[in-house]
Amino acid sequence: MRFLGLDYGAKRWGLSYGDELGLALPLPAAIAAEASARLAHVAREITTRKITDLVVGYPYNMDGTAGPKAREVDAFIAELERRFKLPVHRSDERLTSHQAEADMRAKSSKRGRTPAARRAARATGEVDSRAATLILQDYLDTQNGPALLPPMP
């Protein structure tokens, strides 16, 4: 199986890739101004990587209920299902964007990245794709358990 993880946003969609090895990796985000161009970007990834399943971050509220943003994501999922005819799985995305930003801030401070460089990373969708990676990794872990390496001899 080959999975494409998606972190939906009004302006950018973060993307990630994972397969039966159980490891999610970030991909370039779909950042075009028009949704149709972002869908074309997703279509290219599906074709190029021979994707079999989509995993979309689902915005549950902290109390576990689905709020207004969830209805927007439901419409997005319906469009993905209609257009690509692939199974779409929802994965809890609570706090994934915050975690992705925190991870990037920690790495940036070690590398000496400026606040401007961090803003640029958000504009390019890097944060969104890192969030998509967290979403997909969580899904993969719950399906198969985390990928484990054999013990060292």
Image: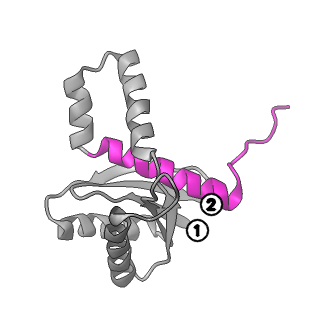
At x 42%, y 83%, the residue is 85
Q: Residue at x 86, y 31 (%)?
A: 153
Q: Which mark is residue 20?
A: 2
Image spot of residue 51 (x, y percent): 47, 69
State which quadrant residue 104 falls in.
Answer: top left
Upstream in the sequence, badge 1 or badge 2? 1
Q: Determine the residue located farthest toward the left in the rendered image.
A: 33
User: Is the residue under label 2 in contact with that under label 1 (CB below 8 Å)?
Assistant: yes
- Residue 21 at least partly seen: no
Q: Any magenta on residue 128? A: yes
Q: Quadrant of the N terminus?
A: bottom right
Separation of residues labelled 1 and 2 (CA atoms): 6 Å
Q: Which residues are magenta?
A: 125-153
> Does the magenta run of residues contain 133?
yes
Spot the residue most to the front: 63
| Amino acid residing under circle 1 | Met
Residue 71's disc is none
What kind of element bears circle 1? loop
Q: Is residue 38 visible?
A: yes
- Image vertical order of residue 149 relative to residue 29, above or below: above
The residue labelled by disc 1 is: 1
Q: Is residue 45 left or right of residue 10?
A: right
